[in-house]
Image: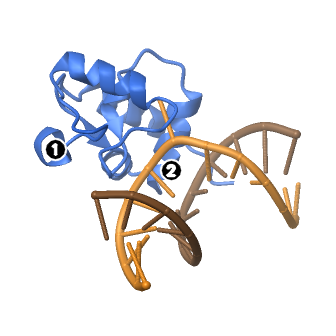
Chain colours: A blue, B orange, C brown
DNA sequence: TCCTTGACTAGGG
DNA sequence: GCCCTAGCCAAGG
């Protein structure tokens, strides 16, 4: 199977770690920057990885975080200066370009 | 090996 | 701008 390599995972971690406080990135952005096959793979890594990375800065392309984490993530983001509007983050303003 | 699940995305109605 | 559908990929049972 075309399993993900440790190198790919490390790249994703690096990208997430370099997202500055007050900015966010989409799954698609991370996937593309890391050279992954699809955005779903990034979601899979985030779900399985238990590191202390700022995963809360990664949101969907709709500007809305995953439903089960929405409340917590939006709260953390707000603490970093990312103001969500009606549960949605204005990507146009906070999206981080790699 | 097949089928299901999931922290996704783009497109059409 | 929201809802539904199809395409997408890796892992676990």
Label 1: few (<14), some (14–19) or many (≥20) C-alpha neighbours in 10 Å: few
Q: Residue at x 18, y 31 (%)?
A: A23
Q: Whole-percent x and y of residue A54?
A: 35, 22
Which comes sooner in the sequence, label 2 or label 1?
A: 2
Would you place residue A47 above or below residue A40 in this image?
above
Q: Which residue is mark 2?
A: A40
Would residue A27 appear left or right of A90 to someone viewing this image?
right
Instruction: Give SS at disc 1.
Output: loop
The quadrant of the rendering that contains the C terminus of chain A is top left
What's the distance in space between the residues labelled 2 and 1, CA to CA?
20 Å
Q: Read off the residue under disc 1.
A: A97
Asked whether residue A6 appears in the rendered view, the answer is no
The residue located at (18%, 44%) in the rendering is A90
Residue A78 showing in the rendered view: yes
Residue at 35%, 40% in the rendered image: A59
Near-viewer residue (A1 or A68): A68
- Residue C6 in which image quadrant: bottom right
Mark 2 touches mark 1? (CB < 8 Å): no
- Foreground: A1 or A96? A96
Q: Label 2: chain?
A: A
């Amino acid at each position: 199977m075309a399993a993900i390599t440790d190198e790919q995972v490390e790249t994703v971690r690096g990208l997430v770690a370099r997202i500055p406080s007050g900015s966010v990135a989409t799954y698609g952005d991370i996937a593309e920057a890391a050279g992954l096959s699809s955005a779903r793979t990034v979601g899979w890594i985030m779900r399985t990885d238990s590191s202390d990375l700022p995963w809360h800065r990664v949101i969907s392309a709709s500007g809305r975080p995953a439903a089960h984490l929405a409340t917590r993530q939006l709260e953390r983001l707000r603490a970093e200066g990312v103001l969500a509007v009606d549960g949605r983050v204005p990507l146009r303003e906070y999206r981080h370009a790699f």
